[in-house]
Image (spheres, rainbow, N blue to C red):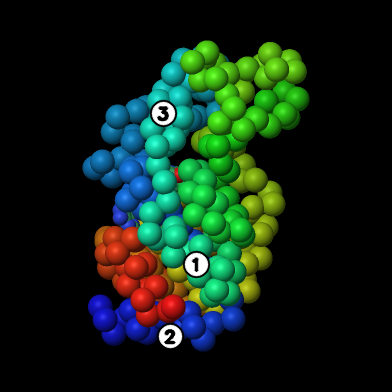
Amino acid sequence: MGILLKKAAEFIRNSNFTIAFTGAGISVESGIPPFRGELGLWNKYNPEILDLGYYLNHSEDCWVYIREIFYDFFANAHPNKAHLVLAEMEQKGLLKSVITQNIDNLHFEAGNKVVHEFHGNSKKLKCLTCGKVYDANKIDFENLPPRCEADDKILKPDFIFFGEGIPPKAYSNSFSDAEKADVCLIIGSTGEVTPASYVPRAAKEAGATIIEINPEESSFTSSVTDIHLKGKASEIMTELAQELF
Ligand code: NAD
């Protein structure tokens, strides 16, 4: 591992354009479980609550579970060492952007400025009728479902549900950065969610070195990964920081 870590750090130090692509795994040590896998949220909840068609017809019922997952549970999570090292890398000019599949806002909370949120952000709520956006911290979740003060319609979390398109700006910025990248860090993603998983693949096609951090193998590992740093995100990123700074 020591040699691989040193090699990874060298690639990053010599790079002109490093990006990070993050998945649910980076937030596991912040206390947010992934959706899938043994300890995943879909073992406890029915994924239908985040299906747009189902949600539109059963918004009030869905909101009971949406509040529990995203506004009770997620609310207590804070950035861990892996998020913080990414923020420090950006600050020191070693990282151009974070492209995240996560909707937990933890990269911004850690201090990263350039974050392309491929699936949106749960800390905002939106009225699907008038488009008004609300800060989740200012919503009274005691009264469900939350409603738009302008037209009384039910608000929807501003992350994408199954059946919704990727926010266009996040999509184009992510692929544009992937094409410029000479190093792409992949942290905590199975690579099974499309089109997000095409981002590191686009970086690879553009010639980037792919450094993956994950305690398990993913669908990236045998296809695009050049260096697999096997372990938990916060531990590996702490060691990487010691090599880098
Ligand atoms: P995933 O749930 O499919 O996979 C998680 C990956 O993280 C796995 O490969 C696993 O081995 C790895 N992992 C587990 N613990 C880790 C750790 N401590 N350090 C590093 N890696 C670790 O996640 P995904 O591929 O990102 O896709 C799931 C989708 O669900 C995402 O698109 C995302 O939008 C959404 N999601 C987001 C959050 C969040 O915002 N925190 C949480 C759950 C799901």
Q: Which residue is mark 2?
A: 10
Q: Nearer the viewer, residue 222 or 169?
A: 169
- Going by the numbered disc 2, the residue's amino acid type is Glu
- Mark number displayed over residue 39: none
At x 34%, y 34%, the residue is 42
Label 2, secondary structure: give it.
helix
Mark 1 is surrounded, within 10 Å at the Cα level, by few (under 14), some (14 to 19) or many (20 or more) other residues, namely: some
Residue 203 percent location from the top left of the image: 54, 71
> Which residue is under mark 3?
72
- Does 136 appear above or below 201? above
Measure how far apart labels 2 and 3 are at the Cα level: 41 Å
Amino acid on which disc 3 is placed: Asp
Q: Nearer the viewer, mark 1 or mark 3?
A: 1
Going from N to C along the chain, the mark reached first, 1 or 2, is 2
| 122 relative to 46 in the view: left or right | right
x and y percent of residue 125 in the render? 61, 30
Q: Label 2 crowding class (10 Å Cα cut-off): few <14, some 14-19, many 20+?
A: few
To which residue does mark 1 refer? 88
Q: Is residue 78 above or below residue 41?
A: below
Q: Nearer the viewer, residue 28 or 165?
A: 28
**Residue 57 picture quarter:** top right
Locate the C terminus by quadrant: bottom left
For badge 1, the amino acid type reads Glu
SS for tag 3? helix
Compared to residue 69, the image places residue 244 above or below, namely below
